Amino acid sequence: MEYTQLGRTGLKVSRLVLGTMNFGPQTDEADSHAIMDAALDAGINFFDTANVYGWGENKGRTETIIGNWFAKGGERRDKVVLATKVYGNMAPDGSTPWPNHDKLSAVNIRRAVDASLKRLQTDYIDLYQFHHIDRNTPFEEIWQALDVLVQQGKVLYVGSSNFPGYKIAQANETAARVGSLGLVSEQCLYNLFERRAEMEVIPAAQDYGVGVIPWSPLHGGLLGGVIKKEVEGGRRAGGRTADALNDPAVRAQIQSYEDLLEKHGLEPGEAALAWLLTRPGVTGPIVGPRTAEQLDSAIRAVELELSEEVLAGLEEIFPGPGPSPEAFAW
C-alpha cells in the first residue's frame, strides 16, 4: 500500500480510503468485520463513515458496526485513521424532528460528536467532516465549536464534504482569522464521468492545502464494466446507472471506455481508480466494497500504472471541463 500526507498535515494516510456505507444496509456485521480486517492487513489505514449511515430507522448502525470491530482489540483503533461526518438529522426515523437535531450549529455538533463517539466505542475521531454546507450557521460559530472539541481531545482534524470552492475558501479564511487550523480535507464527487470538481473545488483545495478525497469513484457502477457485465452475465444495471445508460450518448461513451480498456487488458473499475490516483490534489478515492473480492480489486488499482496511451484515450472519451474561468469563459 502507498501512503501520502492528508492535505497540509503531518498525518499519513493510505491512498485508498475504505468506505463503510454498505456496512449494515448491504453487508452484515460479520462480513463487514472481515472486510475491515482484510483492509487493515492490506495496509489501508484510512476508514470513512458518517453518523447517518445505516439510513432510515437504522441511522447510526454503520458506526455501531465499526465500534464493535474496534472493541475486538488487536490495536485495531490505533492503526486506523477514523473519519466520520456530521450534518444529517439523527432524530429517530418517523418521529417529529426537533429543532437543532441536524446541520452545523454548535448545539448539534456537540450532540452529534458525543453520539458518534459512543457508537464507535472510541474517545476520539481523527477526522471530523461536515457532510454538507450549512448556509445558516456562520463559520465563526462552527470553528468555535470545533476548537472546543479539539481542546477536549475528541477531534484531531476537520474536513468537509460536498463543499463548493468558495465555501472551502470561506471556511479556511475564517479559520485563519480566529486562529484555527481549518479544513484539511474535502470529500467530493469526482470520477472520470463526473469531472466538474476540476473547475473550482480541486483548485481551491490545492491552494489551501486541503486533501481531496473523491467519493463514488466508479460513479455508482457506471465505470465498473457495466455493459460487459450485461453481455456476459445477463445482469442488467439498475437505478441511476440504468437511467444513465438509457441515454444513447452516454451508452456510446461507456462502450468506448470499456473497449479502450479491453484493448489494453485492463479491468474498468481498477482503471477508473488508478486514473484518480494520477490526478493532482487527490489524496485517495473512497472504495465501498460489499465483498472481500471487491476490496481485492480496489487494492490492485494502487499498483496499476496507466500508460500514456491509455491516459490520452481516457481524456478523449471523458474530456474534463478544465479550471475556472476558462471552463466557461476566455
Image: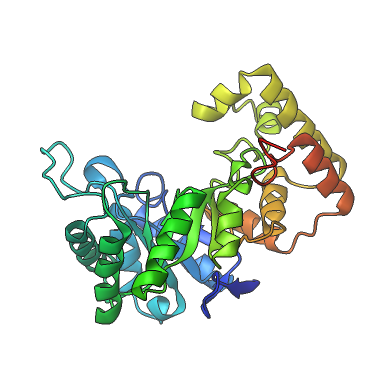
Camera-side residue of 47 and 185: 185
Work out which quarter of the rendered image holds the C terminus and state it: top right
Above or below, 97 against 163 in this view is above
Residue 283 is situated, as x and y percent measured from the top left of the image, at 59, 64
Residue 268 is situated, as x and y percent measured from the top left of the image, at 71, 43
Work out which quarter of the rendered image holds the N terminus and state it: bottom right
* The quadrant where residue 248 appears: top right
Camera-side residue of 164 and 279: 164
Above or below, 50 against 172 in this view is above
Residue 235 is situated, as x and y percent measured from the top left of the image, at 60, 28
Decide if residue 9 is in sight here. Answer: yes
Residue 187 is situated, as x and y percent measured from the top left of the image, at 49, 55
Residue shown at the point (35%, 79%) measured from the top left: 73
Residue shown at the point (78%, 35%) measured from the top left: 317
Decide if residue 127 is in sight here. Answer: no
299 on left or right of 240: right
119 on left or right of 204: left
Total count of labels = 0
Residue shown at the point (59%, 70%) measured from the top left: 42
Camera-side residue of 329 and 189: 329
Q: How is the image coloured?
A: rainbow
261 on left or right of 280: right
Camera-side residue of 291 and 300: 300
